Amino acid sequence: DIPAVAAKIREAFRVDAALRETAVGHILLSDEPLVQSFAREHDLADYTDAEAVNYDVAVEVLSALEILNGYEDDTFKPTNHISREEMAKMIAVLANAGTDVSKLYAKATPFADVPETAWSASYVAYCAKTGIVAGTSATTFSPAVNITGLETAKMLLVVLGFDAEKQGYVGADWKVNVLRDAKVMGLLEGFMT
């Protein structure tokens, strides 16, 4: 029963760092491109393109947690890439244990290319204000640009409690430092040899 599993996982995210280190990392850093929209919750069978989804259980659980939702046209679009603003939404929902923050931080958006009226403004602002994500410059976020695996790993590490400044996830060597810690935490297990 997916809702019961989702409730257990939501509770586990509050207390079990080991689960966050492994399950979330493997789901979000998998080489299967996932995408979500933010219209409504779906069961996998509701998507008209469900046969194209390779990670059924992951999609079911992340949908039940409202981290992934699907598009208004009843598709999931499993081959689409994830943008920086879409990942900010997923990470903000994950970090807040499913609490709806879609409107709470919109006025705090620090980026000129993410106005407070953008659907993603609150998620991006939350992630920026908590150090989970940085802009592509001091004033831009590049919300529609595809997110990279290392950017995702950085976001997950910060959600897990790593301090971006102290760990060196900012500045010229941020990629090396994120890769180091992601490997230590097992976020890249199965993705790199």
Image (spheres, rainbow, N blue to C red):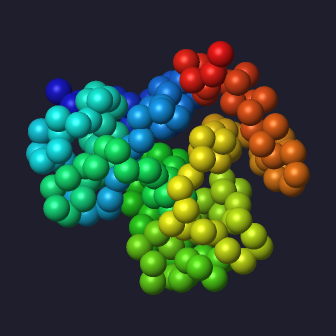
Q: Is residue 84 above or below residue 102?
A: above
The residue at 42%/41% (across/down) is 33
Using residue 183 as the reference point, say whether residue 109 is left or right of it: left
Using residue 86 as the reference point, say whether residue 179 is left or right of it: right
Location of residue 147 in the rendering, given as x and y in whole percent from the top left corner: 56, 52
Q: How many marks?
A: 0
The residue at 45%/78% (across/down) is 118
Location of residue 154 in the rendering, given as x and y in whole percent from the top left corner: 68, 44
Question: Quarter of the image holding residue 27?
Answer: top left
Location of residue 20 in the rendering, given as x and y in whole percent from the top left corner: 53, 30
The residue at 25%/63% (across/down) is 39
Location of residue 172 in the rendering, given as x and y in whole percent from the top left corner: 88, 52
Can see residue 95? yes
Which of the image's four quarters has the C terminus? top right
Query: For this rendering, which residue is in front, 112 or 93?
Result: 112
Can see residue 3? no
The residue at 26%/35% (across/down) is 53
Which of the image's four quarters has the N terminus? top left
Using residue 123 as the reference point, say whether residue 173 is left or right of it: right
